[in-house]
Amino acid sequence: MERVPILKIGPTLFVSIQIDLQDDSVMRLQEDLAAELSETGATGVIIDITAVEIVDSFIGRMLTMIGSISRLFDAETVLVGMRPAVAITLTELGLSLRGVRTALNAERGLKLLSGRAR
Amino acid sequence: MDIDSSQGRMAAYMRDHQDKVVGRWCEMVAAGVRGRSSAVEIRAELEDLYTLVVRVMTGADEQAPGELRAVLAELSRSRARNGFTPRETALAVFSLKDAVYELVAGEADLVPEFLSFSRMVDDLGLHTFETYAAAREQIIADQAASMLELSTPVVRLWDGIIAVPLVGTLDSARTQLVTEKLLETLVATGADHAVLDITGVPTVDTEVAQHLLKTVNAARLLGAECIICGIRPQVAQTIVSLGIEFGDIATKATLADALHHALTRSGLRVTEADRA
């Protein structure tokens, strides 16, 4: 099973999804993230989906769930690097990802989180 | 009655009287088109057609029917493009019957054969009409496509603020195009505010509102905030009476208000220059 690495940069956890997500790797990512959040007390999570070209309702739900998990640890989730085609697909699927903030790229995402910290 | 032989006699008769029939035919068609084609052009067109018709009637030539249909199709397509009415186009073919009948009327023994000839011309006329309609539809489809491209500009208002002036009715095809273009521009410019100006949208019903919301949601997923502006009083009334909710999307009366809002959100302020 492929694992998605979680990087800690300052008070932020950085997750870059670069594999085809399967049920078990998603479960693993959620577990890892929860463990990391409780251990580090990070205040923000950035999920980078620049490499994700195809989304379905499953991935949409996963992203919302990660957002909910992070909020339990008082951390804010920012989804960055979404492709236009992916955004159109998600809206056509009726998924607006409530509870997850979005930014154009990782830099903007970090700015968004640091603005919250201030 | 053997159709082939009767057509054969008719064909021979028509070949013998070609000049007379074509001349009369041209007169009729020229009267119909009222100077939009020159007499010489019409004569050339019709002579071609006439020769083909006679070739089809003799029945010896297997390629003739196909050729005739192709020539007719080309004729009606060019008529459709040049703005001839369906009536004028179809009459061009049907008047061949009249032209021939004027001659045949004197010869009683050819009348039964004229009937089968007339049936053939009717069929050709219908074919002409069909091609004419198809050509017209093609023109409409082409125009719709070019309008779609014309009507979706995305403009940059300020650093980080882009605007989409929407003009015309928003259907799903246009929404898709607008959304794609908006998202592409968001990515290309890195803008974080998008202003949707609906001044040019004549009516906003639940469907249009749904389309707008989809566009806004897609832009949000790219981290951009959308502002809807240019809502006219009547449109506002319709929106309220239909119970459409724009939720937490900012709506402004004019493009100026929307720009001001976006500037404020980006932490910018417009002040009067110091005229010291």
Image (cartoon, coloured by chain):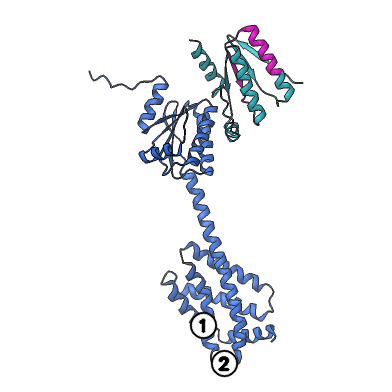
Chain colours: A cyan, B blue
- Residue in the foreground of this view, choosing between A18 and B200: B200
- Image height check: is B173 above or below B185? below
**Residue that lies at the very extreme toward the left in this rendered image:** B276
Label 2: few (<14), some or many (≥20) within 10 Å? few
Seen at 70% across and 25% down, the residue is: A21
Q: Residue A70: name its quadrant.
A: top right
Quadrant of the frame with the C terminus of chain B: top left
Would you say the residues marked 2 and 1 are in contact, meaning their CB atoms lie under 8 Å apart? no
Task: Please report the residue visible at 58 percent of the width from the left and 27 percent of the height from the top.
Answer: A82
Position of B31 with respect to A46 (left or right) is left
In this rendering, does residue A55 appear at all?
Answer: no
Magenta-drawn stretch contains A51: yes
Which quarter of the rendered picture does the N terminus of chain B lie within? bottom right
Residue on which the image places disc 2: B107
Q: Which residue is mark 1?
A: B99
Tags 2 and 1 on a common chain: yes
Q: Upstream in the sequence, badge 2 or badge 1?
A: 1
Dot 2 falls on a residue whose secondary structure is: loop
Q: Identify the residue at horizontal 58%, vertical 13% (top origin).
A: A75
**Relative to B212, does residue B124 appear above or below in the rendering?**
below
Residue B23 drawn above or below residue A53: below
Q: Which residues are magenta?
A: A28-56
Residue B204, percent from left and from top: 44, 41
Q: How many marks?
A: 2
The amino acid sitting under disc 2 is Glu
- The answer to if A37 sits in the magenta stretch is yes
Rendering coords of residue B125 (x, y %): 56, 72
Q: Quadrant of residue A110?
A: top right
Q: CA–CA distance between discs 2 and 1?
A: 14 Å
The subunit letter for the residue under badge 1 reads B
Vertical placement of residue B84 versus B245, above or below: below
Image x and y of residue A92, in percent: 59, 36
